[in-house]
Amino acid sequence: MKKQKEAIEEAAQSVRKMVAAVDKDPNNPQVYYNLGSMLTELKNYQQAEELFKKALHFFKNDDQKAILHYGLGNVFYASGLYKEAIGEFQKIKQNKLKLDALLMIAQAEYAQDNYQFSLAYALTVAEEKNDHDSLMLVGENFLALGNFVQAEKYFDKVLAEWPDDKKANFQRGIVGVVEGEKSEVFFEKVKKDNPEYFQKMKSRLVDVEKFVATRKKGVQGGK
């Protein structure tokens, strides 16, 4: 209870500091973004949305507005309003934020089960940045689309750079189960490093094993 109270007070202090920063430097879009992002993190979505919309009316320059569209897109994404989020991210033409915006579009499409669209955006980002989030999302999309060879390739890319990534290890193990490969090493690593995560995801593993067993029976029955 004490820790929770301290966390609330700490968050309130951070918000107060950011409000003061806006008052001190009202012509800087970054301070609005910082405040809006903090409100989003605190799940104060309505306040965050109002702040970003007011700031977007205040600023006229497209370069200044880019970070505000990005912030508003994040509010909508966090609220589960994926179409509205995509609309905001698509308004960003600034090179500095363009790839970040494309990745967020990919994540919003993935959240709506639009895997082909998500894959196209995620691949664009991965080709440019080759970073963890884009590579992981490409793998997730290939897995969702049933392209296990490509999913394996991208999860292996993630694990080559981030060998302790719990999600990449688990998903790579799932691919192995479907492909009939030995996957114990991936699951054992997750179980050892992140037992809570493994327990949380275990039901998915059971479902996949059932699917594989059913598929094998179907193949044998068809012979």
Image (cartoon, rainbow, N blue to C red):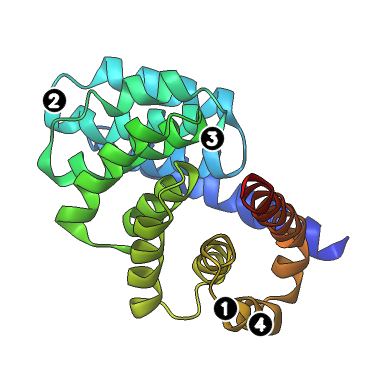
Q: Which residue is mark 3?
A: 78
Badge 3 or badge 2: first in the primary sequence: 2
Tell us which disc is closer to us: 3 or 2.
3
Q: Position of residue 156 (x, y in %)?
A: 38, 71
Q: Of discs 4 and 2, which sits in the foreground?
A: 4
| Identity, as a three-letter code, of the amino acid under mark 3 | Ala
The earlier-in-sequence mark between 4 and 3 is 3
Furthest toward the right, the residue is 1
**Few, some or many residues within 10 Å of mark 1 (<14, 14–19, 20+):** few
Q: Earlier in the sequence, mark 4 or mark 1?
A: 1
Mark 1 near mark 3, Cβ–Cβ under 8 Å?
no
Q: Which residue is mark 4?
A: 188
Looking at the image, which is closer to me, 17 or 220? 220
Q: How many marks?
A: 4
Disc 4/disc 3 C-alpha distance (Å): 32 Å
Q: Position of residue 18 (x, y in %)?
A: 44, 45
- Name which residue type carries label 2: Asp
Q: x%, y% of residue 43?
A: 62, 37
Question: Mark 4 belongs to which amino acid?
Answer: Glu
Assess disc 2: are there few (<14), some (14-19) or many (≥20) residues with their C-alpha within 10 Å of its C-alpha: some
Per the rendering, the mark at residue 182 is 1
Residue 102 lies left or right of residue 184; in this view the side is left
Q: Is residue 60 left or right of residue 49?
A: left
Which dot, 1 or 2, sits closer to the camera? 1
Q: Which picture quadrant has residue 6?
A: bottom right
Say which amino acid is labelled 1. Answer: Lys
Of residue 170 and residue 6, the one placed in the foreground of this image is 170
Element at badge 1? loop
Badge 2 is on which residue? 62
Q: Secondary structure at mark 3?
A: helix
Q: Nearer the viewer, mark 4 or mark 3?
A: 4
